[in-house]
Amino acid sequence: MNKLDKENIFIKDLTLLFGIVLLFTDVFFLVFGIIYDLPLIRYLIYVKLVINSTNIVLILKKHYLISTVIIYSVILLMMIVGIISLGLKPLFQVYSLGMLVCISYNCYLHDRVLKKQLPMFPTIAIHVISYAVMYIYGTINEPLYRISETGENVLIAFNSIVAFAIVILYVYLYHYVATNSEEKLEKMAMVDNLTGLYNRHYLLGSLESREKAALENSWLAILDIDDFKKVNDTYGHNCGDYILHQMAKITEQVCTDCIVCRWGGEEFIVISTNETIKTDILEKLRKKIESEEFKYEGDTLHITITIGVKSYDKSLSNDSWISAADEKLYLGKKNGKNRVVI
Protein backbone atom coordinates (compact mmCIF):
# COMPACT_ATOMS: atom_id res chain seq x y z
CA MET A 1 0.00 0.00 0.00
CA ASN A 2 1.49 3.35 -1.04
CA LYS A 3 1.52 6.56 0.99
CA LEU A 4 -1.41 8.14 -0.90
CA ASP A 5 -3.62 5.09 -0.28
CA LYS A 6 -2.77 5.21 3.42
CA GLU A 7 -3.65 8.90 3.63
CA ASN A 8 -6.95 8.29 1.80
CA ILE A 9 -7.79 5.59 4.32
CA PHE A 10 -6.85 7.97 7.13
CA ILE A 11 -9.24 10.64 5.78
CA LYS A 12 -11.97 8.02 5.54
CA ASP A 13 -11.38 6.75 9.08
CA LEU A 14 -11.18 10.25 10.56
CA THR A 15 -14.32 11.46 8.81
CA LEU A 16 -16.12 8.24 9.72
CA LEU A 17 -15.11 8.68 13.36
CA PHE A 18 -16.54 12.19 13.34
CA GLY A 19 -19.76 10.92 11.76
CA ILE A 20 -20.11 8.20 14.40
CA VAL A 21 -19.51 10.75 17.17
CA LEU A 22 -22.33 12.87 15.73
CA LEU A 23 -24.66 9.87 15.73
CA PHE A 24 -23.71 9.22 19.35
CA THR A 25 -24.51 12.83 20.30
CA ASP A 26 -27.79 12.60 18.40
CA VAL A 27 -28.88 9.65 20.51
CA PHE A 28 -27.91 11.47 23.71
CA PHE A 29 -29.75 14.69 22.79
CA LEU A 30 -32.80 12.75 21.59
CA VAL A 31 -33.05 10.94 24.93
CA PHE A 32 -32.43 14.21 26.76
CA GLY A 33 -35.08 16.01 24.68
CA ILE A 34 -37.62 13.30 25.47
CA ILE A 35 -36.87 13.25 29.20
CA TYR A 36 -37.08 17.04 29.58
CA ASP A 37 -39.79 17.56 26.92
CA LEU A 38 -37.85 19.77 24.52
CA PRO A 39 -39.80 19.61 21.22
CA LEU A 40 -37.46 21.82 19.13
CA ILE A 41 -34.41 19.77 20.07
CA ARG A 42 -36.29 16.52 19.47
CA TYR A 43 -37.42 17.58 16.00
CA LEU A 44 -33.90 18.73 15.15
CA ILE A 45 -32.47 15.38 16.26
CA TYR A 46 -34.97 13.47 14.12
CA VAL A 47 -33.71 15.43 11.11
CA LYS A 48 -30.07 15.09 12.21
CA LEU A 49 -30.38 11.33 12.59
CA VAL A 50 -31.45 11.07 8.96
CA ILE A 51 -28.72 13.49 7.81
CA ASN A 52 -25.95 11.87 9.85
CA SER A 53 -26.98 8.35 8.83
CA THR A 54 -26.90 9.45 5.18
CA ASN A 55 -23.56 11.06 5.87
CA ILE A 56 -22.06 7.73 6.96
CA VAL A 57 -23.02 6.33 3.55
CA LEU A 58 -21.40 9.31 1.83
CA ILE A 59 -18.20 8.72 3.79
CA LEU A 60 -18.14 5.05 2.81
CA LYS A 61 -18.55 6.15 -0.82
CA LYS A 62 -15.54 8.51 -0.41
CA HIS A 63 -17.46 11.79 -0.73
CA TYR A 64 -15.26 13.31 1.96
CA LEU A 65 -15.68 17.01 1.16
CA ILE A 66 -19.48 16.77 0.98
CA SER A 67 -19.44 14.83 4.23
CA THR A 68 -17.25 17.44 5.90
CA VAL A 69 -19.64 20.24 4.86
CA ILE A 70 -22.51 18.25 6.36
CA ILE A 71 -20.60 17.69 9.60
CA TYR A 72 -19.76 21.39 10.01
CA SER A 73 -23.33 22.40 9.14
CA VAL A 74 -25.12 20.07 11.56
CA ILE A 75 -22.74 21.03 14.39
CA LEU A 76 -23.48 24.72 13.78
CA LEU A 77 -27.18 23.94 13.60
CA MET A 78 -27.02 22.05 16.90
CA MET A 79 -25.26 24.99 18.54
CA ILE A 80 -27.84 27.46 17.26
CA VAL A 81 -30.87 25.37 18.25
CA GLY A 82 -29.29 24.49 21.59
CA ILE A 83 -28.75 28.15 22.51
CA ILE A 84 -32.21 29.17 21.31
CA SER A 85 -33.78 26.33 23.28
CA LEU A 86 -31.76 26.40 26.51
CA GLY A 87 -29.58 29.52 26.52
CA LEU A 88 -25.84 29.88 27.05
CA LYS A 89 -25.43 28.02 30.32
CA PRO A 90 -25.44 24.44 28.86
CA LEU A 91 -22.39 25.43 26.75
CA PHE A 92 -23.62 24.51 23.27
CA GLN A 93 -21.38 27.33 22.03
CA VAL A 94 -18.24 25.26 22.74
CA TYR A 95 -18.92 23.20 19.63
CA SER A 96 -18.41 26.21 17.39
CA LEU A 97 -15.11 27.07 19.07
CA GLY A 98 -14.02 23.44 19.01
CA MET A 99 -14.51 23.31 15.27
CA LEU A 100 -11.77 25.87 14.57
CA VAL A 101 -8.87 23.46 15.05
CA CYS A 102 -10.79 20.72 13.19
CA ILE A 103 -11.40 22.98 10.20
CA SER A 104 -7.76 23.93 10.01
CA TYR A 105 -6.52 20.34 10.14
CA ASN A 106 -9.18 18.98 7.77
CA CYS A 107 -8.40 21.68 5.19
CA TYR A 108 -4.71 20.80 5.42
CA LEU A 109 -5.42 17.08 5.07
CA HIS A 110 -7.88 17.44 2.19
CA ASP A 111 -5.55 19.74 0.28
CA ARG A 112 -2.61 17.38 0.83
CA VAL A 113 -4.40 14.19 -0.18
CA LEU A 114 -7.40 15.16 -2.33
CA LYS A 115 -5.78 18.29 -3.82
CA LYS A 116 -9.00 20.18 -3.11
CA GLN A 117 -10.52 21.60 0.02
CA LEU A 118 -13.11 23.87 1.53
CA PRO A 119 -11.91 27.48 1.81
CA MET A 120 -10.40 27.46 5.29
CA PHE A 121 -10.70 31.10 6.37
CA PRO A 122 -14.30 31.65 5.17
CA THR A 123 -15.30 28.39 6.90
CA ILE A 124 -13.62 29.48 10.12
CA ALA A 125 -15.20 32.93 9.78
CA ILE A 126 -18.68 31.37 9.52
CA HIS A 127 -18.15 29.51 12.79
CA VAL A 128 -16.70 32.53 14.59
CA ILE A 129 -19.48 34.84 13.39
CA SER A 130 -22.12 32.23 14.29
CA TYR A 131 -20.62 31.93 17.76
CA ALA A 132 -20.60 35.71 18.25
CA VAL A 133 -24.15 36.18 16.95
CA MET A 134 -25.57 33.35 19.06
CA TYR A 135 -23.66 34.50 22.15
CA ILE A 136 -25.18 37.97 21.79
CA TYR A 137 -28.58 36.38 21.16
CA GLY A 138 -28.23 34.26 24.31
CA THR A 139 -27.39 37.25 26.49
CA ILE A 140 -30.37 39.26 25.21
CA ASN A 141 -33.13 36.65 24.85
CA GLU A 142 -34.59 34.17 27.28
CA PRO A 143 -34.37 30.48 26.29
CA LEU A 144 -37.49 28.74 25.01
CA TYR A 145 -37.35 26.05 27.67
CA ARG A 146 -36.42 25.81 31.32
CA ILE A 147 -34.89 22.65 32.70
CA SER A 148 -33.67 21.64 36.13
CA GLU A 149 -30.21 22.50 37.42
CA THR A 150 -29.36 18.80 37.24
CA GLY A 151 -30.27 18.74 33.56
CA GLU A 152 -28.15 21.80 32.90
CA ASN A 153 -25.19 20.23 34.69
CA VAL A 154 -25.56 17.06 32.63
CA LEU A 155 -25.51 19.13 29.44
CA ILE A 156 -22.53 21.16 30.61
CA ALA A 157 -20.60 17.97 31.35
CA PHE A 158 -21.60 16.22 28.12
CA ASN A 159 -20.97 19.19 25.83
CA SER A 160 -17.62 19.89 27.50
CA ILE A 161 -16.47 16.27 27.25
CA VAL A 162 -17.39 15.94 23.57
CA ALA A 163 -15.92 19.31 22.59
CA PHE A 164 -12.70 18.72 24.53
CA ALA A 165 -12.39 15.20 23.10
CA ILE A 166 -12.65 16.56 19.56
CA VAL A 167 -10.13 19.33 20.20
CA ILE A 168 -7.69 16.96 21.94
CA LEU A 169 -7.93 14.52 19.03
CA TYR A 170 -7.09 17.19 16.47
CA VAL A 171 -4.37 18.75 18.61
CA TYR A 172 -2.82 15.29 18.83
CA LEU A 173 -3.04 14.92 15.05
CA TYR A 174 -1.35 18.30 14.59
CA HIS A 175 1.38 17.25 17.02
CA TYR A 176 1.82 13.96 15.17
CA VAL A 177 2.15 15.72 11.81
CA ALA A 178 4.58 18.32 13.22
CA THR A 179 6.73 15.64 14.87
CA ASN A 180 6.82 13.50 11.73
CA SER A 181 7.67 16.51 9.58
CA GLU A 182 10.52 17.49 11.89
CA GLU A 183 11.86 13.93 11.88
CA LYS A 184 11.72 13.81 8.08
CA LEU A 185 13.47 17.16 7.75
CA GLU A 186 16.13 16.09 10.23
CA LYS A 187 16.64 12.85 8.35
CA MET A 188 16.91 14.72 5.06
CA ALA A 189 19.54 17.00 6.59
CA MET A 190 21.58 14.20 8.18
CA VAL A 191 21.13 11.18 5.90
CA ASP A 192 22.31 10.60 2.35
CA ASN A 193 19.27 9.88 0.21
CA LEU A 194 20.96 7.36 -2.11
CA THR A 195 22.79 5.13 0.37
CA GLY A 196 20.82 5.72 3.58
CA LEU A 197 24.10 6.46 5.40
CA TYR A 198 24.83 9.51 7.48
CA ASN A 199 26.15 12.36 5.34
CA ARG A 200 28.98 14.89 5.55
CA HIS A 201 26.83 17.34 7.54
CA TYR A 202 26.14 14.73 10.21
CA LEU A 203 29.78 13.62 10.40
CA LEU A 204 31.18 17.10 10.89
CA GLY A 205 28.52 17.95 13.45
CA SER A 206 29.18 14.71 15.33
CA LEU A 207 32.92 15.36 15.46
CA GLU A 208 32.41 18.94 16.63
CA SER A 209 30.08 17.86 19.44
CA ARG A 210 32.40 15.17 20.85
CA GLU A 211 34.86 15.83 23.63
CA LYS A 212 38.49 15.29 22.68
CA ALA A 213 38.83 12.68 25.42
CA ALA A 214 36.08 10.66 23.78
CA LEU A 215 38.11 10.55 20.55
CA GLU A 216 41.35 9.45 22.24
CA ASN A 217 41.40 5.94 20.76
CA SER A 218 39.57 6.77 17.55
CA TRP A 219 40.66 6.23 14.00
CA LEU A 220 39.21 7.58 10.80
CA ALA A 221 39.28 5.87 7.42
CA ILE A 222 38.41 7.26 4.01
CA LEU A 223 37.28 4.69 1.43
CA ASP A 224 37.30 5.42 -2.27
CA ILE A 225 35.98 3.14 -5.01
CA ASP A 226 38.75 2.50 -7.52
CA ASP A 227 38.09 3.62 -11.10
CA PHE A 228 34.51 4.51 -10.31
CA LYS A 229 34.31 6.86 -13.30
CA LYS A 230 34.76 3.86 -15.59
CA VAL A 231 31.72 2.22 -14.01
CA ASN A 232 29.57 5.26 -14.78
CA ASP A 233 31.01 5.67 -18.27
CA THR A 234 30.66 1.97 -19.17
CA TYR A 235 27.44 0.91 -17.47
CA GLY A 236 25.68 4.22 -16.79
CA HIS A 237 24.96 6.28 -13.73
CA ASN A 238 22.15 4.00 -12.57
CA CYS A 239 24.68 1.22 -12.28
CA GLY A 240 26.97 3.63 -10.42
CA ASP A 241 24.17 4.38 -7.96
CA TYR A 242 23.64 0.63 -7.49
CA ILE A 243 27.33 0.15 -6.69
CA LEU A 244 27.28 3.02 -4.19
CA HIS A 245 24.21 1.57 -2.49
CA GLN A 246 25.77 -1.90 -2.27
CA MET A 247 29.06 -0.44 -1.05
CA ALA A 248 27.25 1.33 1.78
CA LYS A 249 25.41 -1.85 2.71
CA ILE A 250 28.56 -4.00 2.80
CA THR A 251 30.55 -1.37 4.71
CA GLU A 252 27.88 -1.18 7.41
CA GLN A 253 27.76 -4.98 7.65
CA VAL A 254 31.53 -5.34 8.05
CA CYS A 255 32.31 -2.22 10.10
CA THR A 256 30.01 -2.91 13.02
CA ASP A 257 30.20 -0.53 15.99
CA CYS A 258 31.54 2.14 13.62
CA ILE A 259 30.03 5.31 12.22
CA VAL A 260 29.79 4.95 8.45
CA CYS A 261 29.12 8.08 6.38
CA ARG A 262 29.02 8.97 2.74
CA TRP A 263 31.57 11.74 2.39
CA GLY A 264 30.71 12.60 -1.20
CA GLY A 265 30.85 11.09 -4.69
CA GLU A 266 32.35 7.61 -4.35
CA GLU A 267 34.04 8.34 -1.00
CA PHE A 268 32.94 7.00 2.38
CA ILE A 269 34.26 7.68 5.87
CA VAL A 270 34.39 5.17 8.71
CA ILE A 271 35.07 6.26 12.29
CA SER A 272 35.67 3.86 15.19
CA THR A 273 36.81 4.21 18.81
CA ASN A 274 38.41 0.76 18.85
CA GLU A 275 42.07 1.36 18.04
CA THR A 276 43.09 -2.30 18.17
CA ILE A 277 40.96 -3.61 15.31
CA LYS A 278 41.42 -1.02 12.57
CA THR A 279 43.77 -3.12 10.41
CA ASP A 280 41.74 -6.30 10.69
CA ILE A 281 38.36 -4.75 10.06
CA LEU A 282 39.48 -2.59 7.14
CA GLU A 283 41.38 -5.44 5.49
CA LYS A 284 38.30 -7.59 5.94
CA LEU A 285 36.22 -4.91 4.24
CA ARG A 286 38.71 -4.51 1.37
CA LYS A 287 38.81 -8.27 0.73
CA LYS A 288 35.03 -8.53 0.99
CA ILE A 289 34.58 -5.85 -1.68
CA GLU A 290 37.30 -7.37 -3.87
CA SER A 291 35.70 -10.83 -3.84
CA GLU A 292 32.13 -9.60 -4.26
CA GLU A 293 30.36 -10.06 -7.58
CA PHE A 294 28.14 -7.05 -8.25
CA LYS A 295 25.43 -8.06 -10.68
CA TYR A 296 23.57 -5.34 -12.56
CA GLU A 297 21.20 -5.96 -15.49
CA GLY A 298 23.02 -9.09 -16.62
CA ASP A 299 26.52 -7.69 -16.13
CA THR A 300 28.90 -8.83 -13.39
CA LEU A 301 31.23 -6.17 -12.03
CA HIS A 302 34.28 -6.59 -9.83
CA ILE A 303 35.09 -3.57 -7.69
CA THR A 304 38.04 -2.69 -5.48
CA ILE A 305 38.52 0.04 -2.92
CA THR A 306 41.47 1.96 -1.54
CA ILE A 307 41.43 3.02 2.11
CA GLY A 308 43.43 5.70 3.90
CA VAL A 309 43.52 5.57 7.71
CA LYS A 310 44.61 8.05 10.34
CA SER A 311 44.51 7.56 14.11
CA TYR A 312 43.24 10.44 16.20
CA ASP A 313 45.81 13.07 17.07
CA LYS A 314 44.66 15.73 19.52
CA SER A 315 47.01 18.24 17.92
CA LEU A 316 44.96 18.04 14.71
CA SER A 317 41.70 19.82 14.02
CA ASN A 318 38.87 17.70 12.64
CA ASP A 319 39.50 19.03 9.13
CA SER A 320 43.21 18.24 9.46
CA TRP A 321 42.41 14.76 10.75
CA ILE A 322 40.26 14.06 7.70
CA SER A 323 42.90 15.59 5.41
CA ALA A 324 45.57 13.34 6.94
CA ALA A 325 43.46 10.27 6.18
CA ASP A 326 42.87 11.61 2.68
CA GLU A 327 46.63 11.89 2.15
CA LYS A 328 46.98 8.21 3.06
CA LEU A 329 44.22 7.44 0.58
CA TYR A 330 46.06 9.37 -2.14
CA LEU A 331 49.23 7.43 -1.32
CA GLY A 332 47.33 4.16 -1.74
CA LYS A 333 45.92 5.29 -5.10
CA LYS A 334 49.38 6.29 -6.27
CA ASN A 335 50.86 2.94 -5.32
CA GLY A 336 48.50 0.61 -7.15
CA LYS A 337 45.07 0.98 -5.46
CA ASN A 338 43.12 -1.82 -3.75
CA ARG A 339 44.95 -1.46 -0.46
CA VAL A 340 44.71 -0.13 3.09
CA VAL A 341 47.27 2.54 3.96
CA ILE A 342 47.77 3.30 7.66
Image: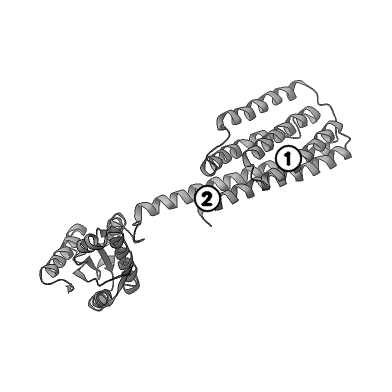
Residue 165 visible in the current orientation: no
Mark 1, residue position: 159
Q: Which mark is residue 175?
A: none
Residue 78 in the image: x percent, y percent?
74, 34
Q: Residue furthest top?
A: 140
Q: Is residue 278 above or below residue 269?
A: below
Q: Quadrant of residue 239?
A: bottom left
Q: Amino acid at mark 2?
A: Leu
Q: Nearer the viewer, residue 75 or 211?
A: 75
Q: Earlier in the sequence, mark 2 or mark 1?
A: 2
Task: Please provide percent x and percent y for residue 178.
Answer: 49, 47
The crowd level at tag 2 (other Cα within 10 Å; few <14, some 14-19, many 20+) is few
Disc 2 to disc 1, C-alpha distance: 35 Å
Name the residue tied to disc 2.
Answer: 4
Q: Residue at x 20, y 69 (%)?
A: 307
Helix, strand or loop at label 1? It is helix
The nearer-to-camera label among 2 and 1 is 2
Residue 257 vertical placement versus 89 (above, below)? below
Q: Examine the rendered structure and indicate whether residue 89 appears above or below residue 106.
A: above
For image coordinates 28% across by 62% down, the residue present is: 240
Q: Residue at x 74, y 42 (%)?
A: 54
- Is 156 displayed left or right of 104 in the figure? right
**Quick one: 95 or 62, which is closer to the camera?**
62
Label 1 sits on what residue type? Answer: Asn
- Where's residue 298, x and y in %? 32, 69
Left or right of 220 on screen, residue 190: right
User: Is 286 located above or below residue 175 in the figure?
Assistant: below
Where disc 2 sits, the SS reads: helix
Question: Which of the 4 image quarters holds residue 256?
Answer: bottom left
User: Image quadrant for the C terminus?
Assistant: bottom left
